[in-house]
Amino acid sequence: MTKIYLVRHAEAMGNVQEFFQGRTDCEVSEKGKKQLELLAERFKDIPIEAIYSSPLKRTIDTAEAVNKYHGLPIIRNEGLIEVDGGVWEGKPWADLPKLYPVEYDLWQNKMHKFYIADGEKMTEVFERMKTTVNKIAAENDGRTIAVVSHGCALRNFLCYAMGKPISALKDVGWSDNTAVSLVEYGENGVPKIIFKNSNDHLTGELSTLSGSKWSIPENIEYGNFGKIHVRNLRNYDPEIFAREEVQQGWLYASPEKLENRLRDNVTGKAVSIAADYDGVPAGYVSVYPYCMWGAFGGKGYSEIVDFNVLEKFRRKGVGTLLLDIAEKIAAEYSDTVYLGVGLHSGYGAAQRLYVKRGYVPDGSGVWYGDKVCNPYSACVNDDDLILYLSKKLI
């Protein structure tokens, strides 16, 4: 088994000043230096045996942080370099829609068809990254290595590793600066994503993406079903749902939970959907295609989390429809989906619903937080006491 940790470079001046940096050789910003300190600690105990990097300054600095506790030579590889932005290089993002309306529309809405004068076609980036990382994997059979590259370049490779064509680039999401993904190559030589775009080592204020204009989710419609309209979770939802949850008696409800889900949607870690009933937000649920926690964490299964329908909209078909669509989304990534359900009476309706839909216990017993409860141990019957259930989708 070959393991490759894919790392995006730290925040650089192009990210701060918001111009197209592509192959422009920018220095790491002050925030980026702090990101690198945390990245180095994340890799301290990971047994890296080789490190490959794009040759640009921001990636070399990032590779050196990954290498802080390992003392390995950093192998520079031109195949890992960022997309060549041609005439876009160094130009402010704010000017691009006016100067290059056709190309900017492609970048925003049909990224897989993007091309620019004197630059690189997106199809070329896709093939280059696929060929380069596959070659690196073949040369390091059975080893654990790190590969440091760039946002657009990594987005293309992760699209390939998801088993999708380049036309699915929009589904991959942008990685945060210093975000980490893990892919494994088995005997068949095909990469499998274990987790994607993880920025768990960063504190909130050190996340570049959370404050970026790119953090605004695009509008995605899943359809109208009578009075119910299903769409993606949007920026206005966290405040609305938190207010309604407090009104129905959830005294500790806050927007933070769904704000975190929105950030995970931007990075492609999650797919979050919401339902409106007669135009009013009524419920929500999220799918994490590559989940790393709970009873099935790291096994390549999708997890459904934060399923909730406001009490005044229950028994109207909202919950059933949300789960139908969530399971279809999960089935695009794995043949099994799992979820955790609370054990106290407040979760009684959800427990019955999951059983009716074919979910069965995983056999690991009761969990508290992120750990299995030992037999005969004392437990607090609160929201953290859960049972994991799974369902075959295919």
Image (cartoon, rainbow, N blue to C red):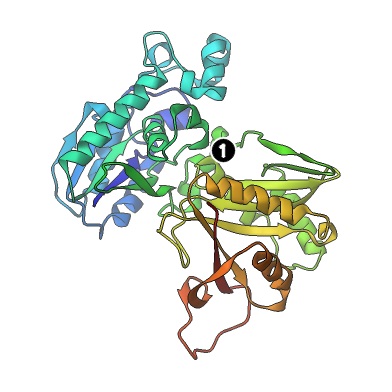
Q: Position of residue 23 (x, y in %)?
A: 33, 22
28 versus 42 height, above or below: above
Camera-side residue of 252 and 311: 311
22 versus 247 height, above or below: above
Which quadrant of the figure has residue 98?
top right
In the drawing, does residue 75 fall left or right of residue 201? left
In the drawing, does residue 23 fall left or right of residue 374? left
Residue found at the far bottom of this picture: 376
Q: Is residue 145 visible?
A: yes
Residue found at the far front of this picture: 394
Q: Residue at x 21, y 37 (%)?
A: 136
The residue at which mark 1 appears reads as: 215
Q: Is residue 260 visible?
A: no
Q: Position of residue 194 (x, y in %)?
A: 38, 51
Q: Residue at x 67, y 42 (%)?
A: 235
37 versus 168 height, above or below: below
177 versus 367 height, above or below: above
Q: Residue at x 52, y 51 (%)?
A: 394
Q: Position of residue 283 (x, y in %)?
A: 74, 53
Neighbours of disc 1 within 10 Å: few (<14), some (14-19), many (20+): some
Q: Residue at x 54, y 36 (%)?
A: 212
Residue type at mark 1 is: Ser
Q: Position of residue 166 (x, y in %)?
A: 44, 28
